[in-house]
Image (cartoon, rainbow, N blue to C red):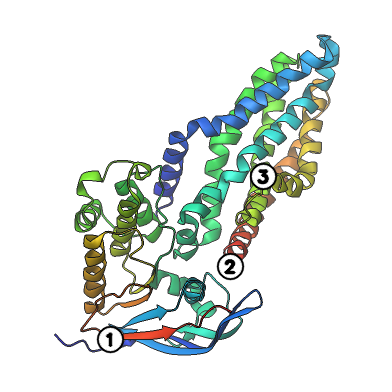
Amino acid sequence: MTAQPSPALTLAARGLAVWRGDRCLCRDLAFELHGGQALHLQGPNGAGKTSLIRVLTGLGRCDAGEVLWQGEPLRRNSAGYRAALAYLGHNNGVKLGLSPRENLAAAGALMDTPASADIDKALAEVGLSESADLLCGALSMGQRRRTALARLQLSRAVLWFLDEPLASLDVAGAALVNRILKTHLAAGGMVVFATHQALELAPFPVLAVKLGTPA
Amino acid sequence: MNSAALVRRDLRLAYRRRGELATPVVFFIIVTALFPLALGSEPQLLRRLAPGVIWVAALLASLIGQDSLFKNDYEDGSLEQMLLSPAALEWLTLLRVLTHWLVTGLPLVILSLLMGLLLNYPLDSLDVLAGSLLLGTPVLSFLGAVGAALTVSLRRSGMLLPILVLPLTVPVLIFGAAAAERAMQGEPVAAPLYFLAAMLVLAVTLAPFAIAGGLRVSLES
């Protein structure tokens, strides 16, 4: 299997600088990511990986430079960009008062996607078929994370942002993340992720951005 | 985007934490019931004070639940998902505030009929009292939501929110209480009710933009 980056999709950063308080997290950062490629944000705790991911999604604010999607700056076409991206942050975005199934249905209502058969399939894929109708408040942290991963799969987004995707997952869960990401990349999708542990994504090209040590 | 499904989700969540949502309603009942105890049981005095007492109690009660309007979503990450969804954030916040009003504001409107009787408010004017609250409490919800959006990322916003929002609610209070007062005295009530209706129209059309802006700013860092 050889992975050819597809030039049809492009996420690029040009001269990106992010300051939080009086600390510079990155300066003059530039990269270009295409379909079928992954971008690994590296750096010690506090280096600003989360801040950078939030800037790339459009949630956070950058102090200089710009992020380009398909060659256009984000604010020019922010609704189109939001339709193309999916984000899994530190917090799962999973409602504890709802079951995994209800959570996915609600996420589907927000994204305008899936039918209930898709939801069943996504739940089975992350190994939550048996707890699909328990309240998420009664599930473990790892199971909540799996619910969020199922949401990721339901979305038709091509560009995934994952902030510490392996947090609170067991060994099988980590393998699951690897598998999901490879499937996504194989379908021509793009992934931007920040982890300390290594993700095994070969043969897909993984670019790396290293963030400095906190002052 | 499927708006009906989102409203259903919010209502389902509200039902599952109905104890928490009952707090403003119980607060409203208790505060209103305290006045006869403190002022004595002189019927004329109670009647004279009834519009003001009920309106102030409703105003304070409506603020109690506002803090949690976006707080839970902020803490569990759902708010980020809302901001990043392709749907217009303004529309999502409008739905959210209306759903919140349905479960916290509407009960106050209905209960005001009962509390009016408790305070010896004339029976044949109760419709105006409830009507003024029906127009006014959604405005309070929207104003509170603007404050809630601005303070959502602050750790202890509990007391900050009323301080931010209460001054803004003064016009609603003035016209709301005036309508109930005038009805009691047999004077025409169209003018204050129209003013309330105008404020409601402004709140529904403009507040969602302010709420969405507040949420974006709150999540920026």
B150 shown above or below A87: above
Chain bearing tag 1 is A
Viewed as shown, does residue A120 lie left or right of B93?
A: left
Q: Please give the name of the residue rendered at 43% of the width and 89% of the height, measured from the top-left corner.
A: A31
Q: Residue furthest left?
A: A1
Amino acid found under the numbered disc labelled 2 = Glu
Q: Which residue is mark 2?
A: B220
Quarter holding residue A124 = bottom left
Q: Please give the name of the residue rendered at 23% of the width and 51% of the height, measured from the top-left corner.
A: A128
Q: Which residue is mark 1?
A: A205
A175 shown above or below B138: below
Chain bearing tag 2 is B
Amino acid found under the numbered disc labelled 1 = Pro
Quarter holding residue B51 = top right
| Cα–Cα gap, marks 2 and 1 | 31 Å
Viewed as shown, does residue B151 lie left or right of A112?
A: right
| Cα–Cα gap, marks 2 and 3 | 21 Å
Amino acid found under the numbered disc labelled 3 = Gly
Q: Please give the name of the residue rendered at 27% of the width and 88% of the height, measured from the top-left corner.
A: A5
